[in-house]
Image (tube, coloured by chain):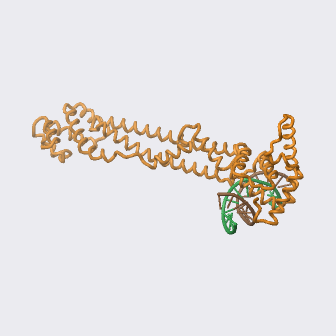
Chain colours: A orange, B green, C brown
DNA sequence: TTGTATGATTCGGA
DNA sequence: TCCGAATCATACAA
């Protein structure tokens, strides 16, 4: 005799085969047995008949059943049977590991500053994107704030939708729990079963949440790719940056190829990236070479400016009774000398193109 | 609207 | 990997 049978026998249920529980004839047959069996059969018959009755009748029947003297014993037995037959089978299968897809989406939203704390994440991502786009701190700030504004918009929509989902989930869960608690008066529903139901609801809502997260990630990616498409968002360098670059170019006309350190220094001064400095020098060299006449005026202008700056520096140095810095290329050259060097370089690159770097 | 300027990209060569 | 050259795409002034 197994546990279940023993339990049922102990409560006087052994004489009622489970398959016959819903059959009124079988129940009637049991009525000829002892009083407890008759009671149980009566209760079961009433339970099975409830679904066929009108709401009012069913309510009245429910009340009658709740007051029946055998109800608690029958109820606990049915709970145990359900516990053993249903939950033991399903319980193990439903312990899902965390969904890797959701984890990926969560990580991405956190990294992009959408789901994490508002301060830091978003602006950090924007700063990174701004740096990658090569925007200077000054003129890039427009794009930077634009990016942040759009990211904030996405963030706001995401959080408001998430809140809605969470609220709906919580409301629905409460509703289902209340319903189950209510039903648990007339049919056996264990706390474990309620837990299982809540877990099912949460899983359903989390799949909806995943769709929301996916859409948000896509929106962020589109925003980012547009922001990073530097070609589409080309901006001229500001005047000061162009001046710094031109000054270097014309004061190094003899060898307008800045070293890596010089490029870094220029990039820092201009608020642009090293590769932008390289691009600028590449463009400048080729365009200068193509049209020297056009750039001559500019070259003279910068040569004079460089000479004046050098003279000022020299005067200050002599005033301070200290020797002029011998390593300053600019300080030791007059505008005329600079121009001469420039022509020399031009002559060399045009007559010996292969040796243009010297 | 159009022409020019300019920053970025691509490609071949050394 | 860096450079020159050609080209693209956009900004900007007329």
Which residue is found at the position 81% from the left and 63% from the top? A348
Residue A176 visible, this orientation:
yes
Task: Judge whether A38 appears above or below A257 on screen.
Answer: above
Left or right of A139, for residue A82: left
Residue A28 visible, this orientation:
no
- Please identify the quarter of the rendering in which residue A170 is found: top left
Spot occupied by residue A26 in the image (x, y as percentages of width and height): 15, 45
Left or right of A320, for residue A3: left
Task: Judge whether A301 appears above or below A188 on screen.
Answer: below
Left or right of A347, for residue A118: left
User: In terms of depth relative to the viewer, which is nearer, A104 or A70?
Assistant: A104
Image quarter in which the N terminus of chain A is found: top left
Left or right of A122, for residue A357: right
Residue farthest along the right direction in this orientation: A336
User: In terms of depth relative to the viewer, which is nearer, A108 or A254?
Assistant: A254
Spot occupied by residue A331 in the image (x, y as percentages of width and height): 83, 45
Counting the numbered discs, the total is 0
Which residue is found at the position 40% from the left and 38% from the top? A173
Image quarter in which the C terminus of chain A is found: bottom right
- Please identify the quarter of the rendering in which residue A342 is found: bottom right
Which residue is found at the position 86% from the left and 37% from the top? A318
User: In terms of depth relative to the viewer, which is nearer, A122 or A19?
Assistant: A122
Spot occupied by residue A300 in the image (x, y as percentages of width and height): 88, 52
Task: Judge whether A327 appears above or below A349 on screen.
Answer: above
Spot occupied by residue A157 in the image (x, y as percentages of width and height): 56, 42
Which residue is found at the position 34% from the left and 45% from the top? A95
């Amino acid at each position: 005799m197994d546990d279940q049978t023993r339990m049922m026998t102990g409560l006087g249920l052994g004489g009622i085969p489970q398959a016959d529980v819903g059959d009124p004839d079988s129940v009637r047959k049991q009525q000829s047995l002892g009083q407890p069996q008759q009671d149980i059969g009566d209760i079961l018959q009433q339970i099975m008949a409830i679904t066929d009755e009108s709401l009012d009748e069913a309510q009245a029947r429910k009340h009658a059943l709740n007051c029946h003297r055998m109800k608690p014993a029958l109820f606990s037995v049915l709970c145990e049977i359900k516990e053993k037959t249903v939950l033991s089978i399903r319980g193990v299968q439903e312990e899902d590991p965390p969904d890797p897809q959701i984890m990926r989406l969560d990580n991405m939203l956190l990294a992009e500053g959408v789901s994490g704390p508002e301060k830091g994440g978003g602006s950090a991502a924007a700063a990174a994107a701004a740096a990658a786009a090569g925007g200077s701190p000054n003129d890039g700030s427009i794009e930077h704030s634009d990016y942040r504004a759009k990211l904030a918009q996405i963030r706001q929509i995401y959080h408001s939708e998430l809140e809605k989902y969470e609220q709906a989930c919580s409301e629905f869960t409460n509703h289902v729990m209340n319903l189950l608690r209510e039903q648990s008066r007339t049919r056996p529903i264990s706390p474990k079963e309620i837990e299982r139901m809540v877990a099912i609801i949460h899983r359903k809502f989390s799949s909806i949440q995943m769709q929301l997260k996916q859409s948000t990630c896509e929106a962020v990616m589109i925003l980012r790719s547009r922001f990073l498409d530097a070609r589409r968002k080309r901006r001229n360098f500001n005047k000061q940056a162009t001046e710094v670059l031109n000054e270097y170019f014309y004061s190094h006309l003899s060898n307008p190829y800045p070293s890596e350190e010089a490029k870094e220094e220029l990039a820092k001064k201009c608020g642009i990236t090293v590769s932008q400095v390289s691009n600028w020098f590449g463009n400048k060299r080729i365009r200068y070479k193509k049209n020297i006449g056009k750039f001559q005026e500019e070259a003279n202008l910068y040569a004079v400016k460089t000479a004046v700056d050098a003279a000022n520096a020299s005067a200050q140095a002599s005033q301070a009774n200290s020797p002029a810095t011998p390593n300053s290329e600019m300080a030791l050259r007059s505008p005329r000398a600079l121009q001469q060097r420039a022509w020399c370089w031009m002559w060399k690159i045009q007559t010996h193109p292969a040796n243009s770097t010297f």
